[in-house]
Image (tube, helix red, strand yellow):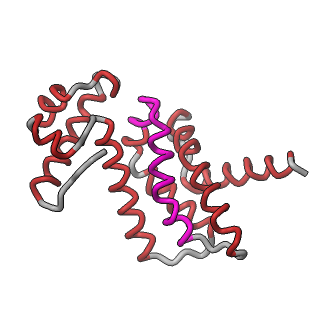
Amino acid sequence: MYHIPNDKRAYKSAALLQDGLVACLKEKPLSAITISDLHRASGVSRATFYRLFDAPADILDYRCDQIFTLIEERMAAEEFASPKAVCSFFIDQWIANADLLEMIVNNHLENRLYQQHLQHAALVATTLQVPAAEQLPFTADLLTAIMPPVLAEWVRAGKQDSAEQLVEKIRAAVGQLLRLWE
């Protein structure tokens, strides 16, 4: 868990710890990173770390929340022609943060990405244009469950596909599932 108060020094320390974590992850897996490692890499004291975070992995959660906040702000400012456009936009925002996705996948933390998506499922639900209102929660939950493994597979496959290509792969995979259930 993280506890970032609304003040400039805390935000700056959190940013330094994020940079420090990235540097540490280039040398060893997350499970081997200590608070001392983060202190050396970031210049942020142990006491400040513990005021802001409980564990090194919480820095990744904080970064994911920052991305979701940015996505939410951008989605509020945009008008989307279709649910497909929403999905492409959403995936494109994560592709822009490929370094974070790579850290998550390389450290086998996809479950944390899934938890972050669950926490922000309302964002998907309010943006999708689903014709039947009673289907909206199911659609939002399904997309929430689909996105983390799709993003993880994108990283494992070498980060080659665009957002539009990933949306098409999701559509094709869902289509295959539907055919299996006929």
Does residue 154 sit above or below 76 in this rendering?
above
Residue at 71%, 54% in the rendered image: 171
Residue at 86%, 49% in the rendered image: 179
Q: Report x, y in % for residue 62.
A: 31, 49
Residue at 18%, 26% in the rendered image: 37
Q: Report x, y in % for residue 22.
A: 27, 35
Position of 70 with respect to 118 (left or right) is left
Tell me if residue 3 is in the magenta stretch: no
What number of labels is visible?
0
State the residue lying farthest toward the right: 182
Span highlighted in magenta in the image: 102-127
Q: Quadrant of the N terminus?
A: top left
Query: Is 86 or 4 nearer to us in this picture?
Result: 4
Q: Main secondary structure of the magenta part?
A: helix
Asked if residue 98 can be seen in this view, the reply is: yes
Position of 3 with respect to 79 (left or right) is left
Does residue 22 sit above or below 91 in this rendering?
above
**Which quadrant holds residue 107?**
top left
Does residue 127 sit above or below 142 in this rendering?
below
Query: Is 168 or 106 nearer to us in this picture?
Result: 106
Asked if residue 43 can be seen in this view, the reply is: no
Position of 146 with respect to 63 (left or right) is right
Residue at 46%, 76% in the rendered image: 78
Q: Report x, y in % for residue 130.
A: 67, 72
**Which quadrant holds residue 139?**
bottom right
Position of 151 with respect to 46 (left or right) is right
